[in-house]
Amino acid sequence: MIDENGLLLRGDGKLYDDMLKYVKEFLKENDGEVTKIFNYPFRKRSEHTRRVFMWARRLVDGESSINKEAVLVSSIFHDVGYAISLDGSKHAEDSALICEKYLHDNGFDAGFIEFVSYLVKNHSNKFLMTSDDIPLELILLMEADLLDETGALSILWDCMAEGGKQYQSYEASYKRIVNYSWESVQVNPMVTDKAKAFWDDKQKLVRDFVKHLSWDLAIGESSSNSERLYGSF
């Protein structure tokens, strides 16, 4: 619910559900649900949005002196602009406009709308994560966005992407996992301690998976003996 000042009351799950439903329907109605650049029909933007919201909720839990509601609302609207951004290059700006209109039409406070729109508009500028003069809310939104589709989910993506090709093999899937899932987590870009720990867990999971898969496939193993010729995973 919204109070008499147009501010979101803490813990109002239904309001978040309504926003998630609105974003999903907006993406679907405007042909923005499926990624257009690559042929990944299994990737849905509304599902990415729901997972980023989930990560944002985990990250704000226990944080004090921040606008948690702004982080959560901005996580819901951060990618809705893909529905009207042809090549995705302006999706953050378009997302901010859509978010601003929704919040205004639903009676939110002007200051809250301005701050959430700022977060949405700047969420793609990941270089700002190392800046000292940006609000913690923007860092948390960026972290939530980056935490999705890494680790276990990234491995699943790689396998599904390889499975959609005409010619498939375990070795090709292994190479893709090394080149994408493993490469993507080698550097920890997180700022907050909680997000750093989440990323470290993902990094360990992918490292262990690649190590075990290379063993199962005898990658780097001499055909004349069972000596391991591992890389440095």
Image: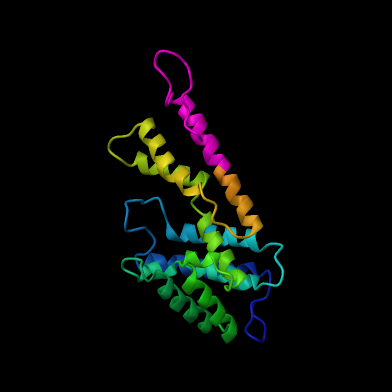
Write the residue at 55% across / 52% down: 188
Find the residue positioned furthest to the left: 166
User: In front: 46, or 85?
Assistant: 85
Q: Residue at x 52, y 46 (%)?
A: 151
Give the magenta range.
204-233
Instruction: Kindly indicate the quadrant of the structure image that contains residue 4.
Output: bottom right
Q: Position of residue 22 (x, y in %)?
A: 48, 70
Frontmost residue, 168 versus 232: 232
Please name whichever residue, 80 or 19, is drawn nearer the observer in this view of the structure. Answer: 80
Instruction: Find residue 16 and report its image quarter.
Output: bottom right
Indicate the position of residue 172 as horizontal and vertical percent values: 35, 35
> Which image quarter is the N terminus in?
bottom right
Residue 106 belongs to magenta span: no
Q: Is residue 146 above or below residue 100?
A: above
| Residue 197 position in % (x across, y down) | 63, 51
203 or 159, which lies in front? 203
Query: How many numbered callouts?
Result: 0
x then y, percent, for residue 120:
50, 72
Q: Residue at x 48, y 58 (%)?
A: 48
Residue 227 within the segment the image draws in magenta: yes
Question: Is residue 159 shown to the viewer in this render?
Answer: no
Residue 10 visible to the viewer = yes
